[in-house]
Image (cartoon, grey):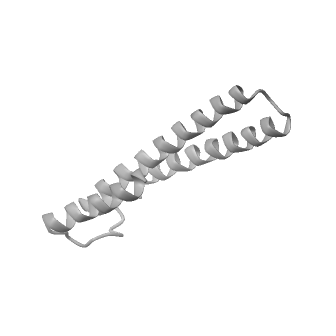
Amino acid sequence: MKESIKGDATRRLSRISGQVTGIQRMLEEERYCVEILTQVAALRAALDQFGLLMLSTHLEDCVYGSDPNGDHPQKMSPEERMDEIKLTLNRFLK
């Protein structure tokens, strides 16, 4: 994984962790339910964006072989690529 992508992913996860902590605090403080739900929606959006980053990285590096570290050097046939894309999307979209 490229260092820039890894750094972006790490920053996103740190923010997500902070959002979860904030929601826990709001619950403990018995904040208004709508405020908590607003933060839950923001958390879901942040997780979706993190997932898209991981999905696009997987497709670029692993499926299409542009991995700069050579961690995934195998070449896939078009059918294998399609199977991998379907499997990955199925896992991500559950």
Q: Is residue 23 above or below residue 32?
A: below
Residue 17 at x, y percent in the picture: 66, 47
In the figure, residue 59 lies in which quadrant? bottom left
**Res 66 visible:** no
Question: In the image, is 40 to the left or to the right of 54?
Answer: right
Residue 50 at x, y percent in the picture: 48, 46
Give the residue displayed 38% in from the left and 52% down from the top: 55
Q: Is residue 15 above or below residue 93?
A: above
Residue 80 at x, y percent in the picture: 20, 68
- Of 32 and 51, the residue lying toward us: 32
Q: Is residue 51 above or below residue 33?
A: below
Question: In the image, is 70 to the left or to the right of 27?
Answer: left
In the figure, residue 26 lies in which quadrant? top right
Give the residue displayed 40% in from the left and 59% down from the top: 91
Question: In the image, is 87 to the left or to the right of 50?
Answer: left
Give the residue displayed 77% in from the left and 26% down from the top: 32
Give the residue displayed 35% in from the left and 57% down from the top: 90
